[in-house]
Image (cartoon, helix red, strand yellow):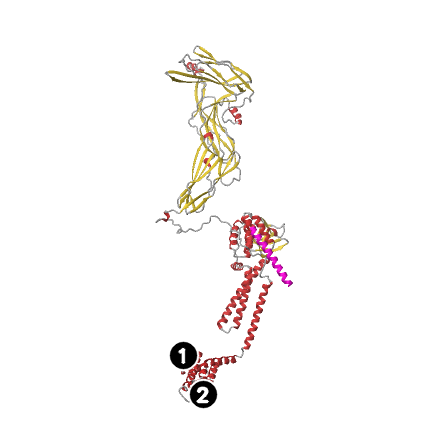
Amino acid sequence: MNLKLLTSATIILLCTGLLTGQDKIFTASAPAVVKAGEQFQYVIEGSEQGVLLLPPLNGFQLLAGPFSSYSSHSQWVNGKMTMKTVVTYTHVLRATAKGSFTIPPATIKVGRKEYKTNKVQIVVNEGTAVAPLPGSNQPADAGSPAVAEASDENPVFLRVIPSRRDVYVGEQFVSGLKVYTRVNTRPSSSAKDIPYEGFYKKTVDPDANAQQQDIGGQQYITQVIQRHILIPQKSGEIVIGPYESEWMVQQRVQRRSSNNIFDNFFDDPFFNGIQDVPMKLATKPVTIVVRPLPPNAPAGFTGGVGDYSLNASLSAGEIEVNEALSLIITIRGTGNLPLLGEPEVSLPPDHDLYDITRSVNTNTSGNLINGSVTFEYPIVARHAGRFRIAPVQFTWFDPGSKQYRTSTTEEFTFTVLKGESEEGQGSVYVPGVMHESVEDIGTDIRDIIRIPQVFTPLASSLFAKTWYKSLYPLSALMGILTLILIRLGARRNADLKLVRNRQANRSARVRLKKADRCRKAEDRDGFYEEVGKAIWGYLADKLNIETSGLSRDVIIQELDQREISEEVRTAFLRILDESEFSRFAPSSEKSEVNQLYKDAVTLIRNLENSL
Amino acid sequence: MKKAYVILFVVMVVTEVSATSDSLYQKANGLYQQGEYETALNIYRDIINAGFESSGLYYNMGNAAYRSNSIGYSILYYEKTLKLDPSHEDAIHNLEYVSRYRVDTFEQVPELFIRSWTKAVVRSFSEQVWSILAIVLFMMLLGSVFIYLFSQRLVLKKAGFFIAMIGLALFIISLSSALAQHRNIIRPDAGIILSPSVIIRSSPSESGTELFILHEGTRVRVNEEVSGWHNIRVIDGREGWVQVNDFESI
């Protein structure tokens, strides 16, 4: 960074007018009305260089000047060259008292000729004291330390001048490093940036030109040599500096006096050397009060402070499964753009979100960070269907109105198609084949029951009901009644022999029914056959013997085993014999037949009783 | 004839009240749907105040209380649901879910396994079901005793004996479970702390030494009562006295 200092020397260019026929008019100009204490320019403009003789400036103080500047341009028109030259002499004056003053004509000597300018009338109003110091970014309260610093011991000093001293976290402001000097000075090569701790900083161009400023009646040349846009990162009181840097300051060096003749000769002020002396300059600490943002930031706040607008779009409305689409969110405006966090996006379930890319595009025109930040959310769909992305909310703090502002995008919908690739051969992913366990997206209580209820009186207890309790003795009583009834029935059936007899009689009769029928029909053969069959059949059933294995011996053996009385056994054998032999004996009477039938009945009854 | 009229009148009144309960229930459900949880809860309470209850009603009240950020009441109402219907799955789920927001946690004193088994058996059915089971088993028991006593055939006699033995065992279980549930209804022995935080004291008065602090939603065993103070016992075995309005019985 080079410091261009203006020198107060007047550069005299010898110039003889090429075209003497030109009119030489010099005009002086100055504002018609100024305030007391105010600086203003008194400019003399002419067409030729010359020696300027200023008139006495009553009521004004010459602060600087004259600075002369010279410009010329030439033109060829129809083979004829015209040349125009403009020379200006600029003076910086200050009104010391109020009233109406006149600056008499100034005289310019060009060669041997003398030209006079017009006179200038200036009315000086009552101004605000002598204190006001015009200058860029000059805070009002910066005046007092400056006056203290501006002394003969301090022909050069540095100051950090922030544009604001009371900001919110994340609110941007400008801070400049300004040098004030009354002598020729330049920074030594190792001039570094101010380390602004606790701030995000962005360097912007410093002033290209120097300015002049009056501090405590002393004229200083000032220039902003470093300028940064700062964004506080934390709340509280942040102190900037002190910042030190090394400068080379031109100083007049008094030579050592001695008796040496040469030395004495060179002791003349003319030969007093001017030397660059290294000097350490330090800024005074500057305190910035950083306020925290108001609490209870609404949803969607990601640290944005400034003035923003939100814009979002989907890269595609329709994709295939396993393809990607992007949600692009652009935040545009002025503020702490490089520090913005990405807005939260709630994806439909079953979608993968990949790394969010973020591109910042800012400029610093007007000493403010403005531009845009673009967030790109790459989304990969895993299943076909129609999905929606909930509206994205972006909230920022507006330090101007001191409140949060929220901007919301519209809702996005997109369709995921079943891709062709997945149906093709060798595709890894086939829907319906891949199984996934159901994932919990959120948890909550289950919903209420809406089916109509069966309301019961409070604290109702079935157990306590009288009718319920009476069920126990009732059923016991029923049981006892049943018991009595069964007992009575048993007594009636007590004569077991009688019953059995009855049953045996019934059994015999059933068995001999057919024989009886033959007897009545006087079918003798049939009768005997049926009696035999009945007796064999009855015994077969009763003794549980297969008909095939039935023989006289077997039956006798069985009957003996059961201890059947001799009488019955004999009767049995007799009837069996009779029924067999009578079939072939023709001399059988009807009475015999009847007797046999009776005997058979008796036999079966007896067997029934004893078996 | 007069008696018949009286019965008819009582039936009509009961159905009338039941009808208003139904409409209140539907109205409260609608309000719940709209997110007016506290109003819904108050209407559900009107049904209770009219003297009626149902497991679904308590369950919905639990939901409404939870949605109006009242953890203590939601736990209370889910417990009440489970008292009426011990196998109410939604209530079991929600009670477990809501219990996460309870402040107090305890080192549970391990219970004798037989005790927890007994509890589990008793809680497996409601009082009504146990009562019905008990009477049915009692009748079965009588029947099988008769079969044993009067059957001529040995197989039936044996079957009757075994059925009678099993029936007797089951009858005793059902009857005692029904009795336990019945006692629980008549005089509940558990309660839920409803005050956000409450100091448990060593004696039933304000001057009692402060023992420990319980928070909303904690289940306690409620023992004897002395002039508006209840002796309570926490699951970890701690005991103390608490005022009646700091908790509600399940």
Compared with A480, A519 (above or below) is below
Q: Is residue B4 magenta?
A: yes
State the image coordinates of residue A136 (x, y, percent, origin top left). Answer: 49, 26
State the image coordinates of residue A97 (x, y, percent, origin top left). Answer: 55, 18
State the image coordinates of residue B53 (x, y, percent, origin top left). Answer: 58, 55
Quadrant holding the C terminus of chain B: bottom right
Quadrant holding the N terminus of chain B: bottom right
The residue most toward the right is B2
The residue most toward the bottom is A587
Judge by depth and name the residue closer to the eye, A143 or B65.
B65
Label 1, secondary structure: give it: helix
Q: Is residue B16 magenta?
A: yes
Judge by depth and name the residue closer to the eye, A18 or B247.
A18
Compared with A243, B169 (above or below) is below
Q: Amino acid at mark 1?
A: Thr
The residue identified by callout 2 is: A590
Judge by depth and name the residue closer to the eye, A29 or A58.
A29
Front disc: 2 or 1: 2
Tell me how far mark 2 sits from mark 1, CA to CA: 31 Å
The residue identified by callout 1 is: A547
- Position of A89 with respect to B66 (left or right) is left
> Quadrant of residue A531 in the image?
bottom left
Question: Magenta part of the protein: which range?
Answer: B1-28
Q: Chain ID for label 2?
A: A
State the image coordinates of residue A434 (x, y, percent, origin top left). Answer: 40, 51
Q: Pointer 2: residues within 10 angstroms few (<14), some, or many (20+)?
A: few
Label 2, secondary structure: give it: helix
